Image: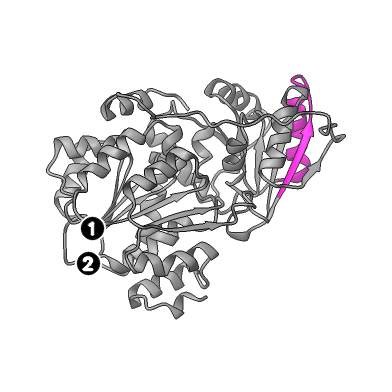
Amino acid sequence: MKFTELKLKPQILKALKQLGYRELTPIQEVTFPHIIAGRDMIAQAETGSGKTAACGIPIVQSVDPAKKQVQALVMVPTRELALQYVSAISDVAKFTHITPFAVYGGFSIDIQKAKLSHGVNILIATPGRLIDLLRNSPLNLSQVQTFILDEADEMLNMGFISDIEFIISCLIHDHQTLLFSATMPREIKHLAKKYLKDPVTLELNIDQIAPQSLCHQFQQTTGRKKLASLLQYIKDTKPTQALIFCNSRRNCENLFDKLKKELDSIDIIHGGMEQSKRTSLFNRFKKKQLKMVVATGIASRGLDFSHVTHVINYDFPDSPLAYTHRTGRTARMGRKGFAVTFFSNHDLHTLKSIIKNNNIEPVWLSEPPQLNNISTPKYRRPRFGRGRKTSSRKTHRRHQGRKL
């Protein structure tokens, strides 16, 4: 279906044409009528399927710019995703008088209060900063018509469930709730059952978690040879842009120190960096001013880097879910992409789970390992936020202290 077939405002159609949007993605086509109709909804889809625009376009359509109150509230787990979300909505609302704005930690709350006082129609927020504003500013959510919870499973992972429940408790009037999640653990199902009213449930491509246009490559190596293997892979494949993932801040810094001596146009990002530096790096990377970035998991969720051709798992992912979200940074929206994962004998159990759970066909860059005789461990997602009496403020402080 084409966007021109929808009854969108002329200003929105003009913006979509300028952005090069012609046809709806599958999730956009299926979700749009339900969102416009005001139905509560649970949508599960592969990463990179167009979830941001799936709810961004209809809420821009439904918001009244003449009203200077917050009419749509979008909750996201990270600052980077908040910035990406507000950028995407700003692009769609470019020719309207609708004002989107993002609030998140690591930035002056006084500046955010001042902006809110001048009128914001669509508010994108991380949980901790929104709670700060609800407690310490005149922020009013009584006019919110649509509440969107995006990357719900990552909210669970980061321990934000109690924060989310507190925020939902502030929305005491009738409103629409949209829940987007790449995976659907039982804690998220419980949250949806508790707060959503007769929701439409949509499951798109859940058997094909990984994008179909993504080539999954695996190479066995040892600790001593891994750096040489990485450099050889980069030399052979010549990525247009690449994200190189490590499991910790220390590993990230150590690898970056070695790679910057061998490669040009490379930088590093992790949760210990100042927000301004992280934002600057993401912007440079999206504008193709950087060719490679060494990153921790902070770059693995929700972020849309259109030009990334390769994701490299230098450190082996600790779960099938981590693999899914890392590799989802390439092959987005049907584009071709490559994911290479270095592994050792110690990783064979998890490797088998990744191949099975993600329903992928591996391409072996080294001798294929004998996986048939290895039992597949049952992956259990860690439980967060269940039965805890911790206040949302303490949850936020604990999260802020984590170094991703």
Task: Provide residue 274's location: percent of width, then percent of height.
Answer: 39, 30
Q: Is residue 189 magenta?
A: no
Give the camera-side residue of 253 and 371.
371
Q: Earlier in the sequence, mark 1 or mark 2?
A: 2
Q: Identity of the amino acid at label 1?
A: Gln
Left or right relative to 323: residue 93:
left
Residue at the outermost right position: 367
Please tell me whether residue 219 is drawn above or below residue 196 in the rendered image: above
Give the camera-side residue of 244 and 185.
185
Scheme of colours in the image: one colour
Left or right relative to 139: residue 310:
right
| Crowd tier of the residue under label 1, counting other residues whose Cα lies within 10 Å: few below 14, some 14–19, many 20 or above | many
State yes or no: discs 1 and 2 in contact (Cβ < 8 Å).
yes
* Residue at (38, 34) in percent of width and height: 275
| Crowd tier of the residue under label 2, counting other residues whose Cα lies within 10 Å: few below 14, some 14–19, many 20 or above | some
Task: Provide residue 300's location: percent of width, then percent of height.
Answer: 53, 39
* Residue at (40, 60) in percent of width and height: 55
Residue underneath mark 2: 64
Please provide the residue range marked out in magenta: 215-238
Task: Provide residue 176's location: percent of width, then percent of height.
Answer: 30, 58
* Residue at (76, 25) in percent of width and height: 344
Task: Provide residue 115's location: percent of width, then percent of height.
Answer: 19, 48
Left or right relative to 39: residue 251:
right
Give the quadrant of residue 80.
top left
Residue 93 visible at all: no
Q: Is residue 223 magenta?
A: yes
Residue underneath mark 1: 71
Q: Identity of the amino acid at label 2?
A: Asp
